[in-house]
Amino acid sequence: MNAEEHIHEDYFDSRSILQIDPTGKDGHGLGAPENLCVADSLDKFSRIKIPGKNVLIHFWSPSEKLQLLIEKTKFAALPTFSGLVRGDELALLEKKGVDILSSQIFSELQGVLMAFSSLLPVPTVKVELIKTLDRTCPLFHVDRVTLRLLCTLSGPGTEWLSDKGVNRKYLGRGDNRKIIKKNALVYEAAPFQIVILKGNAYPGSSGAGIVHRSPAVPSSIDGRWLLRVDAA
């Protein structure tokens, strides 16, 4: 796909950056898509198990210290990380950070990571800090995983679709314009939102995982930095 085709393929009739009041009850009555659930506390992560729900958002608030660290660090100096971590080791993950910034992230997200791992049959997770210079997955797709946690730390957030806005029969055929129904909204998670995605490998969700993709990286910034956590 050349640049001109990519621009044309990437044009949609409608687009929305989802904004949900974190004080709202479960996101209901706020125009939220039917496949979304909201966790206003860590013990509500289990809502992702509800049939018909395949994306969960939790409103995490990083400390002022962490936000300043991220803002002051040049993109090239942002750390990357990849490691398998058992559930009983998550409390010590900050000690595995490669620098002050990654250690601070793991420290502040310890509760989030423990809550996520508790959803898994085997609470061992693969934790990654990833830097990307451009959109890594331009096509809307469903992951072949059970559950995946994403949190964009710098740059635009993950884009996803409501189930009612998707023509699933066109998934994997290389054309976003056919995947997205006419006038459907493309939702985008905000930076620092915790997003849990249900994939096709989740029990009972074959063919019903969340349809999503990575966002385009604007030319005005150097790249995107995110946390990704998968069941090991």
Image: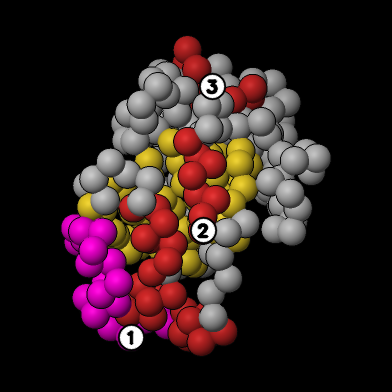
Amino acid type of the residue that numbered disc 1 sits on in the rendered structure: Ile
Horizontal and vertical percent for residue 224? 44, 61
Please give the residue where the numbered disc 2 appears in the rendered image: 42
Instruction: Tell me the number on the disc at residue 179.
Output: 3
Horizontal and vertical percent for residue 185? 68, 34
In the image, residue 39 sits, relative to residue 108, either above or below, namely above
Answer whether labels 1 and 2 touch (C-beta < 8 Å): no
Q: Secondary structure at mark 3?
A: helix
Q: Is 84 contained in the magenta span? A: yes
Q: Quadrant of the N terminus?
A: top left
Q: Residue at x 42, y 83 (%)?
A: 73
Which region shows up in magenta?
73-101
Amino acid type of the residue that numbered disc 2 sits on in the rendered structure: Leu
- Residue 223 found in image quarter: bottom left
In the image, residue 137 sits, relative to residue 84, either above or below, namely above
Please give the residue where the numbered disc 1 appears in the rendered image: 100
In this view of the protein, which residue sits in the foreground, 152 or 60?
60
Residue at the far top: name it: 169
- Residue 101 found in image quarter: bottom left
In the image, residue 175 sits, relative to residue 99, either above or below, namely above
Q: Nearer the N terminus, badge 1 or badge 2?
A: 2
Gap in Å between the C-alphas at discs 1 and 3?
42 Å
In this view of the protein, which residue sits in the foreground, 84 or 132?
84
